[in-house]
């Protein structure tokens, strides 16, 4: 399909294009631009508590387990010392699981942190010599964590004294950073966990905000998150630990999201939330963004203004005005299915049973809610396709999210109606198809953090 550029539309839509381009990810067939980086006014000023991305996938090397990854602290410049990046010791970091479809967490994995700072008045340095192990006395600052598994039946401590892999201060300070990461991985029942710095693995061209790639698709092909790092919490656990009643065959689908609870005079308050990327940036109006970060998913369906932005999305109209890609008719029930209910034949026009909790035989009534949904019974693809479900790879996004899934391109195609028509528009792409660093073959899969300044990598 040839895209036709309407220059008058470009000029007329102006800033609206930049804002609603996010709408493409916003409508949640998943994100597109910097995922949930700096998505709301309050959290933009509190990066240590800002969720950036959530990944959930059947572990490719251990298919009876599921890997959950959640990232925080957007756009970490590798050379940002001497006070490098840390988790907030006044906060609780959570990955939450809904396995029965009521939009309430049935399982919560919760991390809390504490600092060990031995610098005092003696030095400004993060480390006083090469760090060759996590307990090396030359490492002057480290964080420790406690990991708990919370259910409606109570709380269980999985890790009482974990050590966070430190920020990568550079090759002189940390000559074998891979060793430090390996040492930081701790066992949990049936699996393992990790906390530490990682490469920013969400690959895309962020110039979507410059009038939707320059207004003529001339600004594409640059991975604008290349070189940055994030902080990752990772968990690999048996699928049976997540499934309703422990039965993956009868109840294969889970919903996943992450949150941050920060201490305040009122106690712990939820200040950030993320399931699928770009929901808050693009779907929620500016005046409600902070409120959305504080909401639990069970309240989503009761917000008519947000639901309307899904059923009558702005982005497809912009694609039609700017590039001649005809917008599908509204209301967009296909996007409601992708965004709020999960995909199943009884939920909407997408004729497939994929990742709705309605597929769980022991589940009750479904409460529509925004979260990342994964069918744990679908085995890992031998040759994963970056376009996921749209390319016939049912283990890919929006069925969960793998590190290699090209969620921006998927989002663009979904906005154009590909989930129901089965037809892709070849020109709808940011031309960034893979991360600049390869993914690992074993947990936690996400690449090691870089230590080269971003302005040296362009």
Image (cartoon, helix red, strand yellow):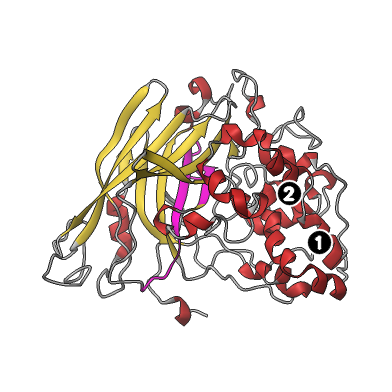
Residue range (magenta): 53-79
Asked if residue 424 lies left or right of residue 446, the reply is right
- 230 to 105, vertically: above or below: below
Classify mark 2: helix, strand or loop: helix
- 298 to 443, vertically: above or below: above
- 455 to 438, vertically: above or below: below
- Name the residue: 65% across, 52% down: 285
- Name the residue: 33% across, 35% down: 148
Q: Position of residue 190 (x, y in %)?
A: 37, 33
Asked if residue 167 lies left or right of residue 126, the reply is right
Query: Would residue 71 be counted in the magenta stretch?
Result: yes
**Residue 355 visible to the viewer:** no
- 25 to 363, vertically: above or below: below
Q: Are marks 1 and 2 in contact (CB under 8 Å)?
A: no
Asked if residue 19 lies left or right of residue 119, the reply is right
Q: Position of residue 164 (x, y in %)?
A: 29, 53
Q: Position of residue 328 (x, y in %)?
A: 86, 49
> What residue did someone put label 1 on?
319
Q: Marks 1/2: CA distance?
A: 19 Å
**How many labels sit on residues?**
2
Label 1: few (<14), some (14–19) or many (≥20) C-alpha neighbours in 10 Å? many
> What residue did someone put label 2 on?
390
Secondary structure character of the magenta stretch overall:
strand
Q: Position of residue 66 (x, y in %)?
A: 49, 38
């Amino acid at each position: 399909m040839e895209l036709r550029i309407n220059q008058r539309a470009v000029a007329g839509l102006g800033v609206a294009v930049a804002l609603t381009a996010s709408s493409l990810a916003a409508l949640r067939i998943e994100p597109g631009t910097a995922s949930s980086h700096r998505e709301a006014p309050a959290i933009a000023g509190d990066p240590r508590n800002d969720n950036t991305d959530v990944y959930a996938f059947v572990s490719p090397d251990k298919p009876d387990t599921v890997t959950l990854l959640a990232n925080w602290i957007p756009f970490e410049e590798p050379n940002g010392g001497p006070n490098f990046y840390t988790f907030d010791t006044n906060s609780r970091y959570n990955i939450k699981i809904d396995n029965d479809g009521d939009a309430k967490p049935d399982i919560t994995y919760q991390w809390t942190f504490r600092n060990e700072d031995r610098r005092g008045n003696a030095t400004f340095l993060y480390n006083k010599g090469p760090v060759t192990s996590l307990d090396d006395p030359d490492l002057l600052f480290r964080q420790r964590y406690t990991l708990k598994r919370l259910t409606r039946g109570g709380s269980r401590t999985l890790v009482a004294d974990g050590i966070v892999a430190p920020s990568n201060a550079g090759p002189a300070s940390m000559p074998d950073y891979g060793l430090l990461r390996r040492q930081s991985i701790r066992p949990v029942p049936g699996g393992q966990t990790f906390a530490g710095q990682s490469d920013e693995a969400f690959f895309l061209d962020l110039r979507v905000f410059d009038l939707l790639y320059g207004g003529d698709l001339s600004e594409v092909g640059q991975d604008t998150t290349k070189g940055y790092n994030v902080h990752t919490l990772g968990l690999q656990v048996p699928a049976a630990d997540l499934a309703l009643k422990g039965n993956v065959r009868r109840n294969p689908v889970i919903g996943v999201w992450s949150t941050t609870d920060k201490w305040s005079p009122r106690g712990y308050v939820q200040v950030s939330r993320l399931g699928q990327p770009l929901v808050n940036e693009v779907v929620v109006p500016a005046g409600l963004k902070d409120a959305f970060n504080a909401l639990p998913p069970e309240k989503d369906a009761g917000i008519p203004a947000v639901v309307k932005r899904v059923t009558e999305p702005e982005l497809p109209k912009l694609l039609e005005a700017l590039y001649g890609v005809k917008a599908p008719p509204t209301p967009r029930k296909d996007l409601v299915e992708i965004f709020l209910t999960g995909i199943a034949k009884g939920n909407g026009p997408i004729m497939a049973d994929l990742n709705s909790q309605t597929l769980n035989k022991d589940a009750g009534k479904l409460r529509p809610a925004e979260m990342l949904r994964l069918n744990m019974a679908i085995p890992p693809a031998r040759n994963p396709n970056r376009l996921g479900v749209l390319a016939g790879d049912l283990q890919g996004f929006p069925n969960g999210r793998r590190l290699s899934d090209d969620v921006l391109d998927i989002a663009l195609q979904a906005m154009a109606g590909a989930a129901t028509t089965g037809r892709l528009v070849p020109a709808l792409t940011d031309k960034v198809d893979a991360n600049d660093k390869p993914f690992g073959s074993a947990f936690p899969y996400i690449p090691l953090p870089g230590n080269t300044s971003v302005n040296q990598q362009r």
